[in-house]
Image (cartoon, grey):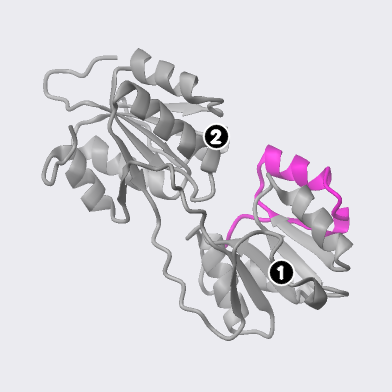
Amino acid sequence: MHNSENCHENVWILSGTSDGPVIVNKLLKLNYVVFVSVVTHKASKSYVENSKLHIITGKLNDSSEIINFIEKNKINYVIDATHPFALIISQNLDEACKKIKKPLLAFERKSEIKPFKNFNYILGLKNINKEVLVNKNILLAIGSRLLNETASYYLKCGANVFTRVIPTYESISTAFASCIKNSNIAILEPSKNKGIILEKKLCDHWKIDYILCRDSGSYAQMNWEEIVYKSDMKLFLVKRPNLKFRNSLIFFDYDKLINQLTGKNNTLG
């Protein structure tokens, strides 16, 4: 696809439903042609309809697929706004863009954790002290990819394992295929109403002692922090991975990212 004479270059964004729509809307207002890659059809519904916006649904398997997409669609800039723990796609993007010398920019949500008495940073999903787990109720809010493996570990530690998953086919099917009891699985979108946090009612119903989640900067994480802060529960938060392979420019502010693309503070080649 080619831009019309009054358009800028083609931009490809890989993102979810939080940061992607904000970045896309800013670019569309500046007359960019934007390609967005999301994993699920449901995620695509978060984006506006626009003749200059092209949404692609599904997973990218490797760097060669990424290169093919970039070359086929004449992409000028790539933006990695994926989940902070999406290591594979970030690594594949980095590898592909280096290989064909395409500018890669990364957007990350700020990690603004203010530690409190019930808060614990841990390095990995299985780094909670085994001795404190026996007969305790632990809620896993970690997504579905590593759910069964993590649940199995904590069940062997003597804990009672519960989980909250988002209402997507993959998450639901993975949860019910896991070693977690069906009665210990809740399907729930993260609450965005600060006055009513359904996760709090869930924790009360299950008498949760510990919550395990990742430092993603998401609505869900903020909900867990607020719930634990006002309770006797404990929050175990997995630190973000160190993406040592990453060679891209990293932005934590939408406008600074956009300014980089538009040339207002351009250091891209």
Which x, y percent locates residue 87?
A: 53, 43
Give the percent coordinates (x, y) of residue 59: 56, 29
Residue underneath mark 2? 39
Magenta-colored stretch includes residue 230: no
Is 68 drawn above or below residue 161 in the view shown?
above
Quadrant in which the N terminus appears: top left
Q: Secondary structure at mark 2?
A: loop
Q: Nearer the viewer, residue 82 or 164?
A: 82
Q: Earlier in the sequence, mark 1 or mark 2?
A: 2
Q: Magenta region: which residues? A: 165-191
Residue found at x 11% / y 24%: 6
169 sits left or right of 207 in the view: left
Amino acid carrying label 1: it is: Ile
Mark nearer the viewer, 1 or 2: 1
- Which residue is pictured at 44% across the width and 50% down the height? 18
Q: Nearer the viewer, residue 11 or 45?
A: 11
Left or right: 32 in relation to 107: left
Q: Tell whether label 2 touches label 1 (CB within 8 Å).
A: no
Measuring from the top left, give residue 82's x and y in whole percent.
46, 43
Give the residue at mark 1: 128
- Going by the numbered disc 2, the residue's amino acid type is Val
Is residue 36 in view from this perspective? yes
* Residue at x-position 55% and y-position 34%: 39
